[in-house]
Amino acid sequence: MKKNTNPLLLLALTLFCLQSFAQQPAKAKKPFRDAVKAGGLLFVSGQLGINPFVQGKDDFRDEVRNALGNVERILKRNGVSLKHVVNVTVYLKKLEQFDVFNEIYVQQFSDPFPARTCVIVKDLVQHANIEISVVASSP
């Protein structure tokens, strides 16, 4: 007697089992805080734009948006927004990425822009293409 097996049911069971046994990524132990308040300012540690849940490299545009999104979430947790940012430091791996970065940057920040430094570096942690840190005024 031939059993009639539903392929969708098999797929659903396989996905359920994979999800059930998948380990959550370990939280990195880091010797620093995401942000520190001092003297009316909020200093946000450098943020990468790598998505740990995506296999392979994200597009550079996505990496920039993710890094800025990480900065924005940390600011929000501390009661401030991108409007409060007074200084931005950007580390890029390639000079050729500068124009693309600027396109996205001007979508997030408006005139009067914060002071900014952009440094081209040989490498970044986790082979990221960009790292962004900011200083914001903290009410």
Image (cartoon, helix red, strand yellow):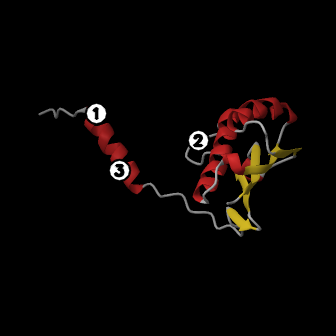
**Which one is nearer the viewer's eye here, 55 or 60?**
60
Using the image, determine if residue 67 lies above or below residue 27.
above
Q: Amino acid at mark 1?
A: Leu
Tag 2 secondary structure: loop
| Of pointers 2 and 1, the one earlier in the residue sequence | 1
Q: Is residue 109 left or right of residue 18?
A: right
Q: Which residue is mark 3?
A: 17
Q: Residues within 10 Å of mark 1 (few under 14, many from 20)?
A: few
Q: Amino acid at mark 2?
A: Gln
| Of pointers 3 and 2, the one earlier in the residue sequence | 3
The residue depicted at 82 percent of the width and 42 percent of the height is 93
Residue 49 coordinates in the image, percent (x, y): 67, 45
Dots 3 and 1: beta carbons under 8 Å?
no
Q: Residues within 10 Å of mark 3 (few under 14, many from 20)?
A: few
Q: Amino acid at mark 3?
A: Cys
Dots 3 and 2: beta carbons under 8 Å?
no
Q: Residues within 10 Å of mark 2 (few under 14, many from 20)?
A: few
Q: Which residue is mark 2?
A: 55
Q: Is residue 132 left or right of residue 115?
A: left
Q: Which residue is mark 1?
A: 8
Residue 25 coordinates in the image, percent (x, y): 54, 57
Distance from disc 3 to disc 1, alpha carbons, whole Å, reads 14 Å
The residue depicted at 74 percent of the width and 64 percent of the height is 40
